[in-house]
Image (cartoon, rainbow, N blue to C red):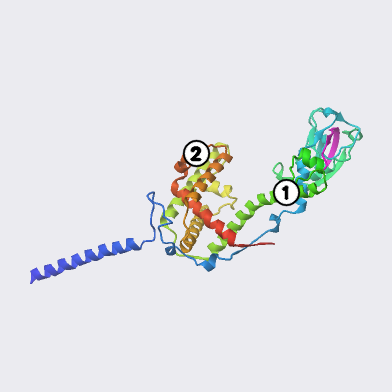
């Protein structure tokens, strides 16, 4: 009898062991995270439906509302051309100064100035203590003077020898809303008392067929020469160029908006643990490096958390850890959405798209003054990250193409 009980107990234990092994096998088989050799989530091999619930109705025919300020206006075209003409101004009189002729647009006025608010002098807004032969040079119309273009335009018409240290001209302007030189006077009305010591004259070319052909070096697509039609054609040409530049900004803004909409719309079942750990380390390493860089430049921070708060413009005492987690969680959500769409639609990455992404990284490096080869990019960025980035770009481009953009 005892022997029979022992056999029953042994069989029961064996059955429990087999059941446990089967359970582990089943759980592993059902586990949604398929990992790369580096321990990252393999977005291609993993079943995205285990992480996010999304259907074609969520991402088809989306609408993005953005500011109409993105549209290039005729006024912006005229302003751009005006700046081109200004950049091609010609110095007169061999650069000799004049004191008995009124300053005009394009001239360089050499001035002494002093700023006041409600009659009280502003120490940061004065060069009256400079040596008599060291006035401040203002290129009228450039917009480079710190008080802005409105200040420069009021110099037009002033005759230098009709002003002096005892007979200064009043120029009133509203300061820029953002004024790093002296934030205390940003957006405020300032009166400048100005003494123009001398002027160097320049001639700004007019917009006409001769200027367009000979100075701006425009080659007419319709072989128009010295006719008024070339002016209209040139403006159209400039507008198209400006629109091409704006297109990149529009695309970036729209894609960001579409992603925000999808993150709010779809349901995330769970966040992949491997990605949460990976991106947390990536972000914390990035902030650590930035903290050390700024600290080495003399900036003072209590600790890493204080740096993150100041770096991102958060309120004092903000939960910076939650803020960082939201940052990298958003990146993961975007990746999950893109690869879920890819799986639903059957999209895959082509060799050409992969190589194009490498070229993009090479160009980015060049814009930062680095010269990297294809092999350098693959080694530093990693083949998996390149593919991840390329697929994200592909899906975003498709979303952008299919979206309706409303300017308001």
Image quadrant where residue 7 sits: bottom left
Question: Quick one: quadrant of the C terminus?
Answer: bottom right
User: In this rendering, does residue 244 appear at all?
Assistant: yes
Image quadrant where residue 137 sits: top right
Residue drawn at 40 percent across, 59 percent down = 46
Residue drawn at 88 percent across, 39 percent down = 169
Residue 385 is left or right of residue 254, and the answer is left
Magenta-span inclusion, residue 204: yes
Q: Which of marks 1 and 2 is nearer the N terminus?
A: 1
Instruction: Say what secondary structure mark 1 lies in.
Output: helix
Residue 257 is left or right of residue 267, and the answer is right
Helix, strand or loop: magenta stretch: strand
User: In this rendering, does residue 191 appear at all?
Assistant: no
- Foreground of the two, 263 or 289: 263
According to the picture, the residue beneath numbered tag 2 turns out to be 373
Question: For mark 2, does the 10 Å Cα neighbourhood hold few (<14), some (14 to 19), or many (20 or more) residues?
Answer: some
Q: Are marks 1 and 2 in contact (CB under 8 Å)?
A: no
Q: Which span of residues is magenta-colored?
A: 192-206
């Amino acid at each position: 009898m005892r022997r029979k009980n022992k056999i029953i107990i042994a069989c029961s234990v064996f059955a429990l062991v087999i059941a446990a092994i089967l359970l582990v096998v089943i759980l592993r088989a059902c586990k949604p995270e398929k990992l790369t050799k580096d321990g990252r989530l393999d977005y291609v091999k993993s079943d995205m439906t285990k992480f996010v619930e999304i259907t074609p109705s969520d991402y088809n025919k989306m609408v993005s509302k953005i500011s109409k300020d993105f549209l290039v206006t005729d006024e912006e075209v005229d302003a751009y051309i005006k700046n081109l003409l200004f950049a091609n101004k010609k110095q007169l009189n061999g650069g000799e100064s004049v004191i008995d002729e009124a300053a005009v647009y394009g001239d360089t006025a050499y001035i002494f100035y002093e700023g006041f608010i409600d009659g009280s002098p502003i120490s940061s807004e004065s060069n009256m203590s400079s040596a008599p032969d060291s006035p401040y040079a203002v290129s009228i119309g450039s917009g480079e003077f710190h008080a802005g273009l409105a200040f420069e335009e009021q110099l037009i018409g002033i005759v230098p020898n009709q002003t002096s240290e005892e007979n200064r001209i009043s120029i009133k302007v509203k300061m820029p809303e953002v004024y790093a030189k002296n934030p205390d006077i940003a957006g405020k009305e300032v009166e400048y008392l100005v003494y123009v010591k001398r002027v160097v004259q320049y001639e700004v070319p007019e917009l006409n067929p001769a200027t367009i052909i000979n100075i701006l070096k425009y080659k007419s697509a319709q072989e128009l020469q010295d006719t008024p039609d070339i002016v209209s054609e040139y403006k159209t040409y400039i507008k198209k160029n400006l629109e091409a530049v704006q297109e990149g900004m529009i695309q970036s803004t729209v894609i960001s908006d579409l992603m925000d909409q999808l993150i709010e719309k779809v349901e995330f079942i769970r966040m992949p643990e491997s990605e949460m750990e990976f991106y947390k380390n990536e972000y914390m390493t990035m902030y650590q490096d930035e903290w050390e860089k700024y600290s080495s430049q003399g900036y003072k921070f209590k600790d890493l958390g204080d740096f993150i708060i100041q770096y991102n413009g958060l309120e004092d005492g903000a939960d910076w850890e939650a803020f960082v987690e939201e940052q990298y969680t958003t990146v993961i959500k975007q990746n999950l959405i893109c690869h879920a769409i890819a799986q639903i639609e059957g999209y895959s990455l082509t060799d050409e798209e992969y190589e194009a992404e490498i070229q993009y990284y090479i160009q980015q490096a060049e814009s930062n003054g680095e010269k990297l080869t294809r092999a350098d990019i693959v080694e530093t960025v990693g083949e998996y990250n390149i593919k991840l980035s390329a697929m994200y770009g592909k899906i975003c481009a498709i979303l952008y193409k299919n979206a309706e953009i409303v300017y308001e």
